[in-house]
Image (cartoon, helix red, strand yellow):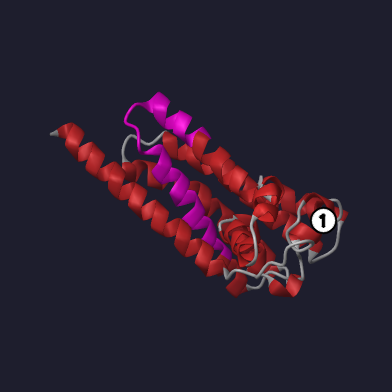
Amino acid sequence: MQLAIFAAASAAMASPASDMAALLGSLLWLVLAAPIFAAGGRCLLDGMVRAGAVIDAGIVVLVVLAASGGAVGPLAAVKIYLLWCAVALTECAVTQQAAAPRKRFILGIVAATAVLITAAGPFWTNAIVQSAEGPWANRMALAVTASNPVYATVATVPQAKFVWNEMPILYELTVLGRDVAIRTCPWYATAIGYAVVALLLMLRAHVGRRRRLT
């Protein structure tokens, strides 16, 4: 799936645009697939292994991108992999909050939807950001971008000079970078944030299962 996205993007546009299209397409696939695969796990470890299979499948496209000599170098590929791991494991941890298989799949859909809503934050948070006064507008804008896996993925490839919210059409749909200045958030801040949430949710799932067994 991810290699097909890269092949289609490479045929339609040159690097670095094709590289960024492949990365964002792969991220979308990861966000949708990882929690559904994780929901099939009978325990926390099984769910992590299933989600890990989806994550590690992304290594293939990252290796291809790094080897193609485009905007995504080996170091950027490693950063993106760590970021994607944090995001997918957070979704996995959400699914494991329930013991019943049907509830786990429902939570998988909820997790994927939540990440998609977070990624679309620059568009639906316009009124919230604009209603903030003084420095709070910039703080709200930073929160929107810091929690966004799309911005974090793009931040790992600064040489691509790709600014998501400044793309055609998108620039007219969000106030970020247009009416409200935004600061670039380091990719690792987003990765650490998701990793912390994943760890807390995994601990909660583990404690909950031990209580049910006792």
Front in this rendered view, residue 169 or 69 = 169
**Left or right, 102 with reference to 208:** right
Identify which residue is drawn at 59% across, 64% down. Answer: 139
Identify which residue is drawn at 46% across, 64% down. Answer: 192
Q: Quadrant of the N terminus?
A: top right
Q: Position of residue 111 (x, y in %)?
A: 50, 40
Q: Is residue 98 magenta?
A: yes
The residue that disc 1 covers is 171
| Total count of labels | 1
The magenta region covers: 80-109
**Left or right, 91 with reference to 27:** left
Q: What is the chief secondary structure element of the magenta stretch?
A: helix
Q: Quadrant of the C terminus?
A: top left
Density class for disc 1 (Cα within 10 Å; few <14, some 14-19, many ≥20) is some
Q: Position of residue 145 (x, y in %)?
A: 62, 60
Identify which residue is drawn at 62% across, 51% down. Answer: 27
Position above or below: 68 against 102: below
Q: Position of residue 94 (x, y in %)?
A: 42, 41
Hey, which residue is sitting farthest front in the picture? 133
Q: Position of residue 165 (x, y in %)?
A: 76, 58
The three-letter amino acid code for the residue at tag 1 is Tyr
Position above or below: 22 against 33: below
Q: Is residue 81 magenta?
A: yes
Identify which residue is drawn at 39% across, 45% down. Answer: 93
Q: From this viewpoint, is residue 181 visible?
A: yes
Front in this rendered view, residue 34 or 214 = 214
Hey, which residue is sitting farthest top in the picture? 102
Front in this rendered view, residue 41 or 148 = 148
**Which type of secondary structure does the marked residue at label 1 adopt?**
helix
Hey, which residue is sitting farthest left in the picture? 214
